[in-house]
Image (cartoon, rainbow, N blue to C red):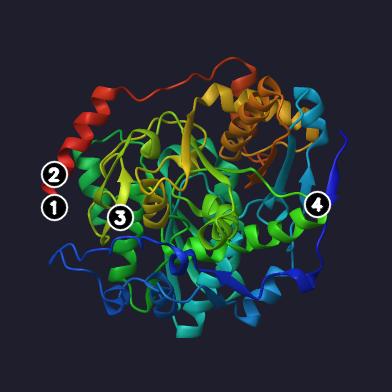
Amino acid sequence: MPTKKFILSEQDIPRAWYNIIADMPNKPMAPLNPATKKPLAVEDLYPIFAEELCKQELNATDAWIEIPEEVRDMYKIWRPTPLVRALGLEKALDTPAHIYFKNESVSPVGSHKLNSAIPQAYYCKKQGVTNITTETGAGQWGAALSLAAKAFGLELAVYMVKVSYHQKPYRRSIMQTFGAQVIASPSMSTKAGRKILTDHPNYQGSLGTAISEAIELAMSTPNCKYTLGSVLNHVSLHQTVIGLEAEKQMEMAGEYPDVVIACFGGGSNFSGITFPFLRHKLREGKEIRLVAAEPASCPKLTKGIFQYDFGDEAGYTPLLPMYTLGHNFAPAHIHAGGLRYHGAGTIVSQLKKDGLMEAVDIEQLDTFKAATLFAQCEGIIPAPESSHAIAATIKEALKAKEEGTKKCILFNLSGHGLIDMAAYDQYLAGDLSNYTLPEEEIKKNISELDKII
């Protein structure tokens, strides 16, 4: 397992997050108030989120937003994360491509999610909030926020998508160990959950449903705010520490990536690694490709449409301009629970609309095949979500082999899969299958969006 690591020091942890909206030639369209259909004012978000996060969400002018020292001090627990040259994988593929990965799995909770969980909890605490709520798919975000909430003395309730609640019991245990309350969603504890269970008693949940429940609880609980692990602009902002570090590390390696790849659910880790590199294209015209790898069973970027839609199933959120499969989309029960979301963040959606990024969809069996090869070559068992990025990277590396081109590929290893071994057991036993979304189902779901606007 030959590898080459590029390590930064604590002094190299970024002192500011990068806000790509300031540099975008076409800014994302404004979120709309669902009642008035008029653009949101920052005050419209105050009942849901901490005020500083609301300001970050709608900030379209400041390219750099300072990271509070308290947050940066907590980042020092595990940041900077290593950049690794995947020499073992290169050898196995017999490719002339150079493959690098940013290893976000070294965080205390095993994923990139802590990069945003800490500032979100910090801003809530600073405002005097005592309780927070959230949703989680595979449990990575819930685990990260559970740790961050405990660090800042906040009470946390997590609505975990029901299929993942049962598929990944140890993620639930991690959240509970850190002191969070974990509820399988849909549940009977909210109006949104009760309605869904009444209409579909055996429904196993989606991120859209869990978001509805978490928002409803936040809105009905005194001194409580809602927090989100992906999709929104301020989450993408916090995650840019990944790409800002990777820039310096690629300089240490003496290379610059031709293509940057990340898995895609709502966009947090994709934004985090790609936006700092994209700024060189926006500002200087530097050539680089950005590739989002999503599940074939939840292909919002490759087969969805660009339209205003709700970010949750019950329609509690503002209307967001996004690539979407429809907020009532019921995703298949794949093991990459963190990618089972119906829409894409507004920034990524605008970038794709403008042709500044690409997307590919990957079948479940291909992701586990890629993950197994990566584990054998590099000694890290990746999360099912991250394995989508690995599969896309392998395709790029094999294409470089066919073409005889020396390509530099960078991907984000967003998390490890040591708590996902039940999924690997199923794969190794031949019990997993692919699920490609039928075109008719996509058309039917999308046709209902006309009622929104």
Q: CA distance from mark 3 to mark 2?
A: 21 Å
Instruction: Tell me the residue at 50%/25% (across/down).
Output: 363
Q: Which residue appears at 75% of the width and 23% of the height?
A: 93
Mark 1: few/some/many CA within 10 Å (<14, 14-19, 20+): few
Q: Which numbered disc flags the more N-terminal residue, 3 or 4?
A: 3
Q: Quadrant of residue 223?
A: bottom left
- Contact between labelled residues 2 and 1, with CB atoms less than 8 Å apart: yes
Give the amino acid type for the residue marked by disc 4 in the picture. Answer: Gly
**Residue 164 against residue 151 in the figure, above or below:** above
Visible residue check, residue 281:
yes
Mark nearest the camera among 4 and 2 is 4
Mark sitting earlier along the chain (4/2): 4
Residue at image mark 4: 254
Report, in whole angstroms, how far the alpha carbon at label 4 lies from the one at label 2: 50 Å
Task: Determine the secondary structure under disc 4.
Answer: loop
For mark 1, give the secondary structure: loop
Left or right, 28 with reference to 358: left
Which quarter of the figure has residue 332? top left
Q: Amino acid at mark 1?
A: Ile
Q: Position of residue 3 (x, y in %)?
A: 85, 40
Q: Which residue is mark 1?
A: 453
Q: Which residue is denoted by mark 2 in the rendering? A: 450
Q: Earlier in the sequence, mark 1 or mark 4?
A: 4
Mark 2 crowdedness (10 Å alpha carbons): few <14, some 14-19, many ≥20: few
Q: CA distance from mark 1 to mark 2?
A: 6 Å
Q: Residues within 10 Å of mark 4 (few under 14, many from 20)?
A: few
